Image (cartoon, rainbow, N blue to C red):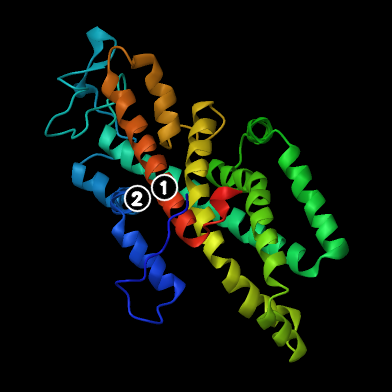
């Protein structure tokens, strides 16, 4: 059941955003999720600084940290954790795992955030346009949504990324993931717009001579902002997981550029001899996706309480 906003501790006349912030502050899960999200966002933003503090770049080899007589396994306990390598080293190459994890966070979160921005902008624009103008415009955009959603997106992503071998992988992945993600939020925004365009204040603005752009920007978009923000937070973990899956399958980010999915794929061969190599990127991926999912669920319950019942 959707959460009910309580206004007992707020002054009279508090708006929905003040009530939403108060409700978010009351939830322990939201506080923990925000802390985890802030940690990984900081890690991604400060990746060059953090790897410099650790003393290693993500592509720098340290052959002295691995044992050539044991198949290149890290020297020392827990995957070679030491004062020189805070999270251990990569088997065979000896690359510093702390540097690769923080730079992997930068790549994975950049792709996820950029793809989400494309999805939200394109989906919101299409949904508002289809819902407000209706008629043939609505029919064309709705059929385009249905067509895009009918594609087996993962297979098409793999095919498109496999064909474009020499392109910038990060930009290409961002564009491809965003291409298949916009219809979901477009449908949500279209439904909200259909319910808003017949409200009294919209009719009053139309009678007063306001044009479509003015009505859309001042009356419709603020009304759909809550659901858009809630669903945006829910989209991000899916984008992170999609990037990791594509990199794991070998069609995403290519070495030596690190990403969590690529690191997980490379660590599978060492999961029984060097489990830390597998545990570190997997834990980062799990915590990030879980934190965004919990935060998105809370925002949806508060900003779009009917969305959880659809």
Q: Residue at x 79, y 53 (%)?
A: 142
Looking at this rendering, what residue extends furthest in the top direction? Answer: 69
Relative to 131, is 309 on the left or the right?
Answer: left
The part of the image, by quadrant, that contains residue 216 is bottom right
Of 14 and 216, nearer the camera is 14
Residue 67 placement (x, y as % from top left):
21, 14
Q: Earlier in the sequence, mark 1 or mark 2?
A: 2
Q: Position of residue 113 (x, y in %)?
A: 49, 52
Secondary structure under tag 1 reads helix
Is any atom of residue 106 visible in this view?
no
190 shown above or below 63: below
- Residue in the foreground of this view, choosing between 269 and 209: 209
| Residue 99 screen position, x and y as percent | 29, 39
Marks 1 & 2, CB-CB < 8 Å contact = yes
The residue lying at 39 percent from left, 69 percent from top is 19
The answer to whether residue 163 is above or below residue 115 is above
Q: Residue at x 55, y 67 (%)?
A: 225
Q: Is residue 188 left or right of residue 288?
A: right
Name the side, left or right, on which 299 lies relative to 208: left
Q: Position of residue 190 (x, y in %)?
A: 70, 60
Q: Which residue is mark 1?
A: 292
**Rendered image: mark on residue 107:** none
Tell me what residue is drawn at x 40 percent, y 46 percent.
Answer: 294
Please give left or right for residue 82 compared with residue 186 in the image.
left
The residue closer to the viewer here, 302 or 265, is 302
């Amino acid at each position: 059941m959707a959460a009910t906003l309580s206004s007992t501790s707020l002054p009279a006349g508090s708006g929905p955003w003040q009530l939403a912030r108060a409700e978010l502050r009351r939830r322990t899960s939201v506080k923990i999720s925000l802390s985890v999200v802030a940690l990984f966002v900081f890690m991604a933003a400060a990746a060059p600084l953090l790897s410099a503090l650790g003393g290693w770049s993500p592509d720098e080899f340290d052959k002295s940290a691995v044992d050539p007589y044991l198949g290149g396994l890290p020297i020392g306990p827990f995957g070679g954790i030491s004062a020189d390598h805070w999270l251990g080293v990569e088997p065979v190459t000896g690359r510093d795992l702390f540097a690769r994890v923080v730079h992997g966070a930068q790549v994975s979160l950049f792709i996820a955030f950029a793809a989400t921005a494309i999805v939200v902008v394109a989906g919101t624009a299409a949904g508002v346009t289809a819902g407000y103008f209706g008629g043939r415009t609505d029919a064309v955009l709705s059929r385009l949504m249905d067509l895009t959603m009918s594609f087996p997106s993962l297979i098409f992503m793999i095919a498109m990324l496999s064909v474009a071998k020499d392109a910038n992988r990060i930009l290409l992945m961002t564009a491809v993931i965003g291409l298949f993600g916009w219809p979901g939020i477009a449908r949500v925004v279209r439904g909200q717009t259909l319910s808003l365009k017949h409200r009294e204040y919209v009719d009053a603005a139309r009678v007063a001579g306001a044009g479509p752009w003015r009505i859309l920007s001042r009356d419709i978009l603020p009304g759909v902002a809550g659901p858009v923000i809630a669903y945006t937070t829910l989209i991000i973990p899916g984008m992170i997981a999609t990037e990791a899956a594509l990199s794991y399958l070998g069609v995403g980010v290519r070495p030596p550029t690190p990403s969590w999915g690529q690191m997980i794929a490379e660590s599978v061969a060492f999961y029984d001899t060097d489990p830390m190599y597998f545990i570190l990127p997997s834990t980062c991926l799990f915590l990030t996706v879980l934190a965004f999912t919990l935060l998105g669920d809370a925002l949806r319950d508060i900003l779009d309480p009917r969305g959880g019942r659809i």
